Image (spheres, rainbow, N blue to C red):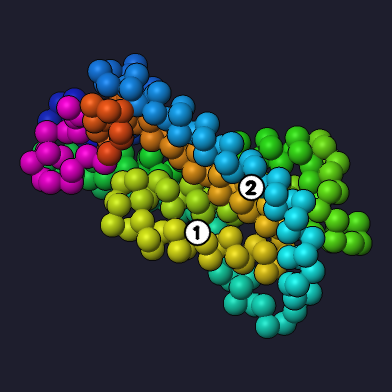
Amino acid sequence: MSVAPTIAPRAGYPAQLLAVAGGALVQLVRAPSHSRRAAAARKLARHSLWLSAAGAALVIVLMVAFDQAEIQLMPARGTAWLWPIRILTDFGKDEYVLIALAIALVAVALFAAGLRGTRRRLLLGFGTKLQYVFLSVVLSVFVAEILKFVIGRGRPFVGGKANPFNFVPFQGTEAYFSLPSAHAVTAFALAFAVSALWPRLRVYMFIYAALILLTRLVLLAHHPSDVTAGALVGIVSAMAVRYWFAARRLGFAIRADGTIVPLPGRLKRVARGPSAP
């Protein structure tokens, strides 16, 4: 949504809205144009590989040495005093997060269609950032759903005992949708995406993500290795979407060494439309 659509000044509101919505979609699929995207791709591949290897090793260690002991320490399902935890955990539910982001995107389009000039460009620039956050969560959840179906890990105490090795691949039921945790995927994708755009919010966003992770353990919805895997999927997926945006000069710039950084939020920079050096 960062580039103001070209449309006749006297066009009516429906045409303006159509132009805004169309421009928002077109910018996402246009050919990458950043001259430094190859360096950014190499850095992304390197960081993703190391992060995935370290995360996979940690998941295995937790599965073998910690999962069973941890879930036996948690309060029983249905414990009355857990109601605040049940409320808190919904702030990481993928449906709720995606609906909230989708409503925000629609609102941006509706308001931007009625604006002109700098005010429209400012709002569309913010809309591009919302697109990045939304797509980071969407990709993360999509990957997680595939992994859940393929892996088919039973949730804690499914089958009547604390068995961390209860796997029925391709089961496709909620009871066997434990690895990775969708709440952890959503929370960490959201935390990474927001932090990538607004670094000053990093501490607060990852505190939020950690709290969502802990609620899944306390409620016996997941094993520790499930939420760890979810955090890994969320972060790596958000990193991949960030590269997609940066390669198209949307919301991010790429430095000479391939590091991807958020574009400055200064009025004069946004008014020109986002561009990377």
- First in sequence, mark 2 or 1: give its number: 2
Residue drawn at x 18%, y 46% as measured from the top left: 265
Quarter-of-image position of residue 118: top left
Residue drawn at x 58%, y 60% as measured from the top left: 213
Q: Residue furthest bottom?
A: 81
Q: Which residue is mark 2?
A: 58
User: Magenta region: which residues?
Assistant: 262-277
Q: Secondary structure at mark 1?
A: helix
The spot of residue 232 in percent (x, y) is: 56, 44
Please say whether residue 18 is visible from this viewpoint: no
Looking at numbered disc 1 in the image, what kind of residue is underneath it? Ala
From mark 2 to mark 1, how far is it between C-alphas? 18 Å
Residue 253 falls left or right of residue 49: left
Residue drawn at x 33%, y 58% as measured from the top left: 201
Q: Secondary structure at mark 2?
A: helix
The spot of residue 235 in percent (x, y) is: 49, 43
Residue 103 falls left or right of residue 121: right
Q: Which residue is mark 1?
A: 209
